[in-house]
């Protein structure tokens, strides 16, 4: 991004939430809110008009929800990064957004400094997900499904993971356990740079966008 400010669009159906987020973001020298939206359809229009770097996306809104809007936004040419906003009573919606390529999420009651850190992290192309949050989202994804659905998902996941090298599979399992890069490196006795290299290779081989999607594939393969 150089010295340019990170351009942010805020999407939330509550006016007070949007106002608070604008105040937080605009108070930083390196960030600026360039647009707001109260629903998914408007979010898509605003993103097309302003071409932000990051979208702070609520998941539950009247009309078009954040999941559907995220999917369409990420299908745009040179799309922004999406950072999901949640109150954590909507785990399935957040999971859906992460599955289609959102790069992370923050709780609405997260301290302002951490929200700002998450925006910067996502703007740099890195996932903004704590290990604890990753573990909870994975747990939410393992709810009851029919035996046929479980078998199909498991077989697909196992086929994809079979394309990885042994070391990459070990890295994938460590990510699925919610470990950060430094902890993965320690477990496997490799460098953090090697962990990052394995992760980049896995993203390309598996056709996924982020670490959470890798973790979900591992969990699907184990069902």
Image (cartoon, rainbow, N blue to C red):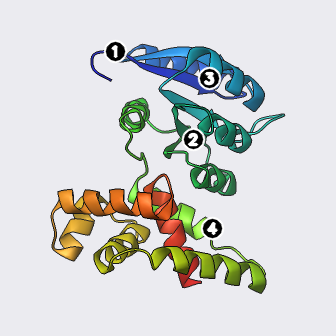
Mark 3 touches mark 2? (CB < 8 Å): no
Distance CA(mark 1)–CA(mark 4): 38 Å
Q: Quadrant of the C terminus?
A: bottom right
Q: Residues within 10 Å of mark 4 (few under 14, many from 20)?
A: some
- What secondary structure is found at the residue carrying circle 3? helix
Which quarter of the image is occupied by the N terminus?
top left
* Residue drawn where x is 34% and y is 65% of the image: 179
Marks 3, 2: nearer the viewer = 3
Mark 2 and mark 1 residues within 8 Å of each other at the beta carbon: no
Q: Earlier in the sequence, mark 4 or mark 2?
A: 2
Of mark 1 and mark 4, the one earlier in the sequence is: 1
Residue depicted at x 16% and y 69%: 190
**Label 4 belongs to which residue?**
141
User: How many angstroms separate mark 3 from mark 1 (CA)?
Assistant: 18 Å
Disc 1 on helix, strand or loop? loop
Q: Earlier in the sequence, mark 3 or mark 2?
A: 3
Answer few, some or many: residues within 10 Å of disc 3's Cα (few below 14, many 20 plus, some between 14 and 19).
many
Picture coordinates of residue 204 (x, y %)?
A: 42, 58
Q: Nearer the viewer, mark 1 or mark 4?
A: 1
- What residue is pinned by disc 3? 47
Q: Earlier in the sequence, mark 2 or mark 1?
A: 1
Q: Which residue is mark 1?
A: 4
Q: CA distance from mark 2 to mark 1?
A: 23 Å
Q: Residue at x 40, y 32 (%)?
A: 123
Cβ atoms under marks 4 and 2 closer than 8 Å: no
Residue 22: x, y in percent? 53, 17
Q: Which residue is mark 2?
A: 84
- Mark 3 → mark 4, Cα distance in angstroms: 29 Å
Whether 172 is drawn above or below 38: the answer is below
Could you tell me residue 4's position as x and y percent?
A: 34, 15
Mark 1 neighbour class, 10 Å CA radius: few under 14, some 14 to 19, many 20 or more: few
Dot 2: element: strand
């Amino acid at each position: 991004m150089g010295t340019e400010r990170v351009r942010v669009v805020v999407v939330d159906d509550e006016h007070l939430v949007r106002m608070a987020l604008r105040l937080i973001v605009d108070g930083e020298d390196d960030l600026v809110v360039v647009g707001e939206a109260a629903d998914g359809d408007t979010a898509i229009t605003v993103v097309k008009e302003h071409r932000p770097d990051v979208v702070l996306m609520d998941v539950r809104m009247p009309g078009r929800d954040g999941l559907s809007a995220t999917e369409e936004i990420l299908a745009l040419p040179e799309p922004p990064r999406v950072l999901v906003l949640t109150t954590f009573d909507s785990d399935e919606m957040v999971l859906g957004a992460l599955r289609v390529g959102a790069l992370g999420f923050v709780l609405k009651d997260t301290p302002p400094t951490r929200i700002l850190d998450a925006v910067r992290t996502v703007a740099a192309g890195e996932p903004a997900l704590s290990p604890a949050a990753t573990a909870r989202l994975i747990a939410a994804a393992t709810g009851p499904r029919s035996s046929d659905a479980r078998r199909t998902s498991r077989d697909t996941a196992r086929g994809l993971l079979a394309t990885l090298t042994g070391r990459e599979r070990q890295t994938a399992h460590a990510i699925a356990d919610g470990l950060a890069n430094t902890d993965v490196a320690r477990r496997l006795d490799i460098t953090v740079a090697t962990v990052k290299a394995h992760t980049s290779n896995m993203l390309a081989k598996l056709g996924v966008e982020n670490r959470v999607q890798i973790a979900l594939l591992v969990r699907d393969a184990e069902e």
